[in-house]
Image: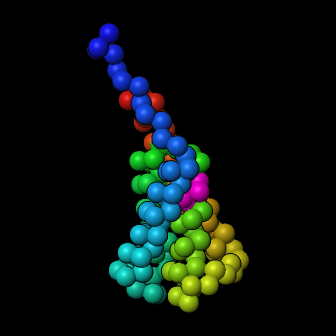
Amino acid sequence: MFLRRPKPVRRPTELLIGIGFFVAVAACAATALLAPDTLVEVRFAVMGLAACLYAVVAADLWAAAVTGILAWTLATGFLTHPVGELSVTGGSDAIRLFAIMGLSVAGGLYGVLRRRTA
């Protein structure tokens, strides 16, 4: 009886989304300080990587998707346009959205599969 594997603790999605928001803000602040203004794609790659790593740890697809959208809006508003104005200019912003969302959801899927097999 005492040798059974303990049940994994289920964390609420709302809490994971809130933590994801703080992760995205911290990644945006660190990226703004460390990466030069001219390297826009590097800045977006760092934001996508931060969203992906958080999604792996969170192991929740809804939280991963929302964190990806938050990372994209912060990167578009503060890393592309230093004024802090969110303006979508066209195809390049859509490609960046799909890239960050793809990284985030892929990380979330990996986290879910890893948690199920553990």
- Numbered-mark total: 0
Query: At 64% across and 75% down in the image, what residue appears?
Result: 92
Query: At 54% across and 73% down in the image, what residue appears?
Result: 74
Query: At 35% across and 80% down in the image, what residue appears?
Result: 34
Residue 71 drawn in magenta = no
Q: Indicate whether 40 appears above or below 66.
A: below
The type of colouring in the image is: rainbow
* Residue 45 visible, this orientation: no
Q: If the image is split into quadrants, where does the C terminus sit? A: top left
Q: Indicate whether 1 appears above or below 21.
A: above
Residue 26 at x, y = what percent? Answer: 41, 69
Q: Indicate whether 105 appears above or below 71.
A: above
Magenta stretch bounds: 64-68
Q: What secondary structure predominates along the stretch shown in magenta?
A: helix
Residue at the farthest top position: 1
Q: If the image is split into quadrants, where does the N terminus sit? A: top left
Q: Nearer the viewer, residue 71 or 21?
A: 21
Q: Nearer the viewer, residue 118 or 43?
A: 118
Residue 74 in the figure: left or right of residue 2:
right
Residue 84 in the figure: left or right of residue 5:
right
Q: Quadrant of residue 70?
A: bottom right
Residue 29 at x, y = what percent? Answer: 42, 76
Residue at the farthest bottom position: 83
Query: At 45% across and 64% down in the image, what residue appears?
Result: 22
* Residue 86 visible, this orientation: yes
